[in-house]
Amino acid sequence: MEEITALAKRRGFIFQSSEIYGGIGGFFDYGPLGSILKRNVKNAWWREIVELRDDVVGFDSSIVMHPNTWVASGHVAAFHDKLVDCRNCKHRFRADHLASLEKCPDCGMTGTLTEPRDFNLMMKTQVGPLEDTASTTYLRPETAQGIFVNFKNIYQSARKRPPFGIAQIGKSFRNEITPGNFTFRVREFEQAELEYFVPDDGNDMACYETWVAARKKWYSDYGVRADRLRFYELKPEERPHYARAGTDVEYLFPWGWGELESIAHRGTYDLDAHMKLSGKDLTYFDEATKSKYTPILIESSAGMDRTTLTVLIDAYDSETIVDDAGKESKRTVLRFHPKIAPVQVGIFPLARNKAELVERARALELELRPHFRTTYDEGNVGQLYRRQDEIGTPFCIMVDYDSFDDHKVTVRDRDSMRQERVAFDALAGYLRERL
């Protein structure tokens, strides 16, 4: 992780938020490459869940909602972690993260930890001009509730009938007691959530299993190593009382297994809770049968920051290579899936002090830019390749002196490091086929 976090900062993937002021725990900024990487991950999820299906619609709810939303959802009463403090070193811990409540893990003192107490993870904020209790609300701890309270608005305006889904990607906030492991446990994060509503016709479990299989395929399609990914089926005692089934998608991080996504059969609990508190009807009216019913909910909730961290870690590789002269050197490479890679094609001139090479390389980059994510760079050839390897660029193109005679360029493959001469007029097709 030390190597990966150092690389993330050096190459502009992820920075500590407010670093010049000492940072703030649990908050991170995505740099020039990281912002593209994360957007590509989100786009891949959105493409698969929404754009390629005709039974899922998109949605974007507000971050601040009516306070009663969180009363109905149970967050006000039950969204707590158990908190303990050390009386000696004053450090704070989540009780369920400690091996023992007898000894402080930081200072080593025995008998200095306080009794566990509830700590609500929601972040409060004020709405309106007066800071009184009437204006207190919360930054949403999840995106799903916006979908539930708008269920009727959405299915009526989109003219959908169950089974159909509503998907959104957006910011959520949780006042984590002990954020850590880089961007894995943070206080501000992005969620991608699908709420899929199905009729109570006996096919709900089959629908749940179909979505579990679909999510397995998505991770496989984008190259996450199967031996570092598992789908853990929750036991009855591990899932909420209203859930009929649940699966956690977990990845083997350097510190151990960590959850990326939760897939759950939630019954009718969420819509029922909002109907009870609001007094509003959120049932579905079936025109064909002239009957009303509350749809069963299948949910997929994935953390986009965690997924982005996963593809970064999963792509990371460090290897020893030997050149033609027998000299060994270390090569750090990010083996991103081509659709996820922040830069897909790097274009360089063989020499930066030769105007004709620079001009042709820059022109080529402009030609390819509308079709691929490209970058132009110049300098020492070996350093150029190493730099692009470290940011995960699948292909590098070198314009050299022979290019003016044979009208070809040298294309280097990131993973195999093989080089091939490709004609200018065949270049776009060559890249498109391999990307």
Image: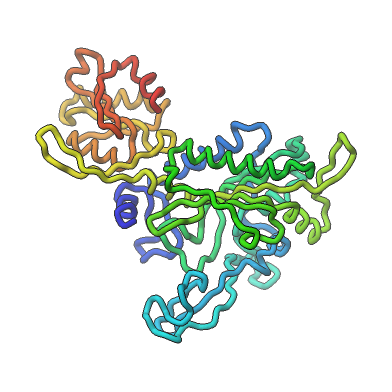
Horizontal side, residue 111 vs residue 349: left or right: right
The picture quadrant where one finds residue 243 is bottom right
Q: Is residue 304 above or below residue 50?
A: below
Residue furthest to the left in view is 325
Horizontal side, residue 385 vs residue 430: left or right: left
Q: Is residue 297 visible?
A: yes
User: Camera-side residue: 70 or 230?
Assistant: 230
Q: Is residue 109 above or below residue 27?
A: below
Q: How many marks?
A: 0
Residue drawn at the location 51% of the way across and 73% of the way down: 95
Q: Position of residue 315 (x, y in %)?
A: 37, 43
Residue drawn at the location 22% of the way across and 34% of the way down: 378
Q: Is residue 124 above or below residue 109?
A: above
Q: Position of residue 96 (x, y in %)?
A: 52, 70
Q: Position of residue 28 (x, y in %)?
A: 43, 56
Q: Is residue 191 visible?
A: no
Horizontal side, residue 348 vs residue 95: left or right: left
Residue drawn at the location 84% of the way across and 42% of the way down: 285
Q: Position of residue 347 (x, y in %)?
A: 28, 29
Q: How is the image coloured?
A: rainbow
